[in-house]
Image (spheres, rainbow, N blue to C red):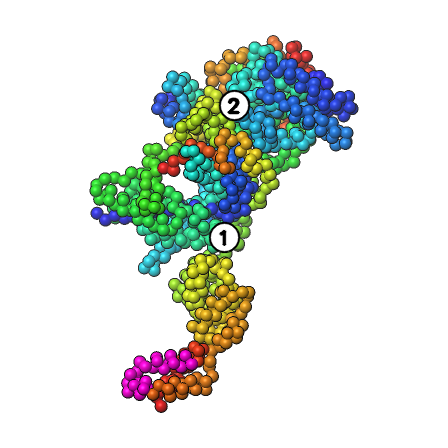
């Protein structure tokens, strides 16, 4: 059962080599043993997991099992789970028992997956190192002195250390892909609107998108097929049929046109990371892809535009946390203003406050045009850059992150340096495109990720391109020493 | 651009966040750094560029005017179990002075 | 210094949809606190709004009814401010791109002339909850049932010049939304309420003076009084050489005065921006034409038609079309009676309305059907009963049980008018014979005794004789 991918576990369950209950118990044991070291889980849902596992086993006996029935999964603590604490990594929601399920949770429940627990994350998904969590930082299983990336750091660490075979995650500026890269995993951020945002606590609504984190592209294909789909409760959800991504995963890559944006291989990129990525590109050439250089001339403006749009939306999205209907409330407020101000000041951490302030500023009278409107125009330019590129290439490839995992504490006092961790991932969110990160090697003991970007709704192609690579390499199958 | 302490106080008030006097310089520096980063946008002339508020180029989808299956999503007891202070089905807050 | 009053109104009409604007929770008034507030209305983490299409149809209907431009693309924005009755910390509203723009409403002034009042815009937004101030150990209680109720905000141009014009405009808007059946118009429950912007300027000035906004006026009378108070207050300020401050004021109905709520300096910065949870609302010509085809006959058109079709005066036609229900009632009566529209108008506006008012009933729950009224008027028309008797019959119909026709009451009570000349002649003979003195006086020139004879004859005939006929016969007899 250990170190097996979802597709392998699925075969084992189907062949009755082990039951879901046994599988679940094994992961719960591992969580008990290793979580104190990693801090990947905020809440472990032992009881829920065992009930769901037994239900999955019964379902299998009745002949109603699908490929994901009985497979355990960890849920990022940003997804509301009915009756289970949903903290979003914040003191504000430390006592928040969600009264309903996110659509993603419902969908995974519906196919019979087993929830192991809720994973740690940067508070309200704001961060790139998982150091902004009220529940403390998460450690990278490949090097416990380094960060796992963020904001889905708990999900990434849990999967990388085999505390769960896969996890859900969300990506607003790189929060699936960057931790995937730093932890040696495969993760995909789908086209905006493919996965419902209902019940996914909002950070920046026009950028947020849920997706899976797993070891292989094939596992991501299984999970995305289950997570994606039209949801009438989310009016930004796209109403189109979801293909079974597993079916198209084996297509050959002959003739695939890969574009390498020259802007993604310039200043700021670590040499060793660049080298590793180049080797991976060579591998693609061997697999039959045609490689060419392209330009995304406005790439350098992605971070500036993002740090207006995301804070602006978050300043409004987080206004509902006021200590009235749920969440943290300060002691004996003397008046309304005191209730709001003290509850929020106590409930939010530094980075969240910083972004709320920046966003409030960017939207305030007299600054709106110069900041918010300007950022929306830049967003258009960035999106247009991609569309021009996709006229003559199929997939864009480049590094996911400019560096490998950095040391805990290294960037906490320098927000700007932290923001630059997402320099290659953010543009994808601004344009709403799908992006995938897959492991393509190591620098020392630290994994390196390759990012693949496709045009809208090309998730199937991205998973296929990653899968073919994983058929001829084994980076995705490596296990960090301490967690074997 | 950098922000004067009075401006920081104003946006902190609008955000209903309290910033201690001693923390003002740090926030001031952080926000100035972020705004400097953000102002790189000014390198590009965007005259005539249509702002993109949303990645999806599609119209808003509407809902039929029908009462939904809501069950627990509207169960007051269940929803107020997580509220800090309620009485007689009402959420309690410090006196609202209706001016 | 002559001052001119400038008024603009912002009217909020709650739309009568089944469900809220962004959630599928019931939109009924008067439920137990917080029992009609679902996770969306409560602004729980992770919830999302989905727009109710019926609200769009209703807003477009209104737009077409006021000859406005319907935006093919409109956008929902967030208005950000903290308040306990606003669960998300922002209100979803339309800001830069509203659904309805540039309409107008014609009002009739006291002198009978007409004036077009511009309607800048009408847009959709969500209502907030309510703060209840009963004392909970010094705390306020928040009820979020109303949160998410669909509102149409109708903003006029500053075209109104007096409280009278403002009321007249507000009544027309009220009439329109009720006609269109998009709002129940109930002002007591807050379904229809208004903010008034009032300023003064020296007559002849092109620029507007500093304006004051008076919030949440929920009756026509309050609007009128609040404006009048405000005009006087501002007049005094200006006449004393001071300046009016831009501020938001509230109207205190007990003291009949307006009071300052907050000045411009304290005004919030609402930080509007397009709501990223809601894409632009696009409407095609096809949708708009379908709504147009569904529009009922509008009040002004109905009034005009009544004037031509039924030869009614402007006043009568206006009264009868003041509500769609009354207009329909009237037309049913006329059709059933097969003509005599003036008679129908008089009765509906007279005795019938008096009954409604006395019983405090809406025409829609009148106990007397238009068919019953027609059956009554038929007998007035053919002189089976006199007008006076008809009033008694109407009363009998009103308080009677079941759907009986006037005829059965007339027969039952023997109210049929006496038109038999010989019976009337006999009665006249008796009266003349038994009152020789009065007869002598009359014949010697005391003409006003004629009334006395009429009264005596009618007394004998129990009031059931046709007065004209009695008149005629008596006159002839006395001349003999």
Residues at marks 2 and 1, CA–CA distance in whole angstroms: 47 Å
What kind of element bears circle 2? loop
Quadrant into which the C terminus of chain A falls: top right
Total numbered labels placed on residues in the image: 2
Where residue A454 sits: x, y (%)? 60, 27
Q: Say above or below: A319 vs B29.
A: below
Q: Position of residue C390 (x, y in %)?
A: 46, 71
* Residue drawn where x is 64% and y is 16% of the image: A32
Q: Give x and y (percent) for residue A360.
A: 43, 28
Q: Which mark is residue A90?
A: 2
Residue at 47% over, 18% down: A416
Q: Is residue C320 left or right of residue A10?
A: left
Query: In this rendering, does residue C129 appear at all?
Result: yes
Q: Residue A140, how many percent across, how many down?
A: 59, 14
Residue at the spot x=50%, y=29% of the render?
B84
Q: Is residue A347 magenta?
A: no
Q: Look at the image and give the residue range highlighted in magenta.
A: C437-460
Residue tagged 1 = C181
Q: Quadrant of the N terminus of chain A?
A: top right
Q: Secondary structure at mark 1?
A: loop
């Amino acid at each position: 059962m250990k170190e097996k991918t979802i597709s392998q576990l699925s075969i084992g369950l189907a062949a009755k080599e082990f039951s879901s209950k046994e599988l679940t118990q094994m992961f719960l044991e591992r969580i008990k043993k290793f979580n104190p070291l990693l801090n990947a889980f905020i809440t472990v849902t032992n009881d829920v997991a065992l009930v769901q596992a037994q239900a999955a086993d019964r379902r299998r006996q009745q002949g109603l099992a699908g490929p994901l029935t009985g497979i355990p999964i960890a849920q990022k603590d940003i997804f509301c789970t009915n009756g289970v604490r949903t903290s979003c990594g914040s003191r504000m929601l430390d006592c928040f028992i969600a009264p309903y399920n996110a659509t993603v949770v419902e969908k995974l429940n519906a196919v019979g997956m087993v929830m192991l627990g809720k994973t740690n994350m940067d508070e309200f998904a704001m961060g790139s190192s998982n150091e902004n969590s009220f529940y403390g930082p998460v450690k990278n299983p490949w090097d416990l002195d380094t960060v796992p990336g963020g904001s889905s750091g708990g999900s990434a660490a849990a999967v990388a250390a085999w505390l769960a075979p896969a996890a859900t995650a969300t990506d607003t500026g790189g929060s699936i892909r960057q931790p995937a890269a730093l932890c040696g995993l495969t993760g995909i951020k789908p086209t905006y609107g493919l996965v419902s945002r209902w019940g996914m606590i909002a950070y920046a609504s026009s950028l947020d998108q849920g997706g899976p984190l797993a070891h292989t592209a094939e596992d991501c294909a299984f999970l995305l097929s289950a997570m994606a789909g039209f949801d009438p409760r989310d009016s930004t959800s796209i109403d189109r049929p979801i293909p079974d991504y597993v079916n198209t995963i084996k297509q050959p890559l002959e003739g695939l046109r890969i574009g390498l944006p020259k802007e993604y291989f310039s200043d700021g990129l670590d040499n060793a990371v660049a080298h590793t990525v180049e080797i991976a590109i060579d591998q693609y050439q061997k697999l039959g892809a045609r490689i060419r250089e392209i330009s995304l001339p406005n790439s350098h403006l992605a971070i500036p535009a993002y740090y207006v749009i995301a804070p602006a939306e978050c300043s409004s999205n987080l206004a509902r946390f006021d200590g009235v209907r749920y969440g943290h409330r300060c002691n004996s407020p003397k008046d309304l203003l005191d209730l709001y101000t003290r509850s929020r000041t106590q409930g939010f951490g530094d980075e969240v406050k910083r972004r709320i302030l920046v966003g409030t500023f960017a939207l305030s009278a007299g600054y709106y045009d110069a900041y918010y409107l300007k950022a929306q125009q830049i967003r258009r330019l960035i999106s247009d850059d991609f569309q021009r590129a996709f006229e003559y290439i199929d997939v864009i490839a480049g590094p996911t992150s400019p560096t490998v995992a950095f040391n805990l504490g290294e960037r906490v006092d320098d927000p700007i340096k932290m923001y630059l961790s997402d320099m290659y991932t953010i543009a994808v969110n601004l344009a709403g495109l799908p992006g995938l990160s897959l492991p393509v090697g190591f620098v020392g003991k630290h994994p390196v990720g390759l990012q693949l970007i496709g045009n809208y709704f090309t998730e199937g192609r991205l998973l296929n391109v990653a899968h073919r690579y994983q058929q001829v390499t084994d980076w995705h199958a490596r296990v960090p020493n301490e967690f074997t | 651009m950098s922000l004067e302490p009075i401006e920081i106080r104003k946006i902190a008030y609008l955000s209903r966040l309290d910033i201690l006097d001693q923390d003002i310089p740090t926030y001031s520096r952080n926000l100035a750094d972020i705004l400097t980063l953000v102002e790189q946008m000014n390198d590009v002339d965007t005259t005539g560029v249509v702002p993109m508020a949303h990645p999806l180029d599609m119209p808003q989808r509407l809902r039929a005017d029908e009462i939904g299956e809501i069950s627990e999503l509207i169960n007051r007891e269940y929803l107020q179990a997580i509220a800090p202070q309620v009485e007689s089905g009402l959420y309690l807050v410090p006196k609202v002075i209706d001016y | 210094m002559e001052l001119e009053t400038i008024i603009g109104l912002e009217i909020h009409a709650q739309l009568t949809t089944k469900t809220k604007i962004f959630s599928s929770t019931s939109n009924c008034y008067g439920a137990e606190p917080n029992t009609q507030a679902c996770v969306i209305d409560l602004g729980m983490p992770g919830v999302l709004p989905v727009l109710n299409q019926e609200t769009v149809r209703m807003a477009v209907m209104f737009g077409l009814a006021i000859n406005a431009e319907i935006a093919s693309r409109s956008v929902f924005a967030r208005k950000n401010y903290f308040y306990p009755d606003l669960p998300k910390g922002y209100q979803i509203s339309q800001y830069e791109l509203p659904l309805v723009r540039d309409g107008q409403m014609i009002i009739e002034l006291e002198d009978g002339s007409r004036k077009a009042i511009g309607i800048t815009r009408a847009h959709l937004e969500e209502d907030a909850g309510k703060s209840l101030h009963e004392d909970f150990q010094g705390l306020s209680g928040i009820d979020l049932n109303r949160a998410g109720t669909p509102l149409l905000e109708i903003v006029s141009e500053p075209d109104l010049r007096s409280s009278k014009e403002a009321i007249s405009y507000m009544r027309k808007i009220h009439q329109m939304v009720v006609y269109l059946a998009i709002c129940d118009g109930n002002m007591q429950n807050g379904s229809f309420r208004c903010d008034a912007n009032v300023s003064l300027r020296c007559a002849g000035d092109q620029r507007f003076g500093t304006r004051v906004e008076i919030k949440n006026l929920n009756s026509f009378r309050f609007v009128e009084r609040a404006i009048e108070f405000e005009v006087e207050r501002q007049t005094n300020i200006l006449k004393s050489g001071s300046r009016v401050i831009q501020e938001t004021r509230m109207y205190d109905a007990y003291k009949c005065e307006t009071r300052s709520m907050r000045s411009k300096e304290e005004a919030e910065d609402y930080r509007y921006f397009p709501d990223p949870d809601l894409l632009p609302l696009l409407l095609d010509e096809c949708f708009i034409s379908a709504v147009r085809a569904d529009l009922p006959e509008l009040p002004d058109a109905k009034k005009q038609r009544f004037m031509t079709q039924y030869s009614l005066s402007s006043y009568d036609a206006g009264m009868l079309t003041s509500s769609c229900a009354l207009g329909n009632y009237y037309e049913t009566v006329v059709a059933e009676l097969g003509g005599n529209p003036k008679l129908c108008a008089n009765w509906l506006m007279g005795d019938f309305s008096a009954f409604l008012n006395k019983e405090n009933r809406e025409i829609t729950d009148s106990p007397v059907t238009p068919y019953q009224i027609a059956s009554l008027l038929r007998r007035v028309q053919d002189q089976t009963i006199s007008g006076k008797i008809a009033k008694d019959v109407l009363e009998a119909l009103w308080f009677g049980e079941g759907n009986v026709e006037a005829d059965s009451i007339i027969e039952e009570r023997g109210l049929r008018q006496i038109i038999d000349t010989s019976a009337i002649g006999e009665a006249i003979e008796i009266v003349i014979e038994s009152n020789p003195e009065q007869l002598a006086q009359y014949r010697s020139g005391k003409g006003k005794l004629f009334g006395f004879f009429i009264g005596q004859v009618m007394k004998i005939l129990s009031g059931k004789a046709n007065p004209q006929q009695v008149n005629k016969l008596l006159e002839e007899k006395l001349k003999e």
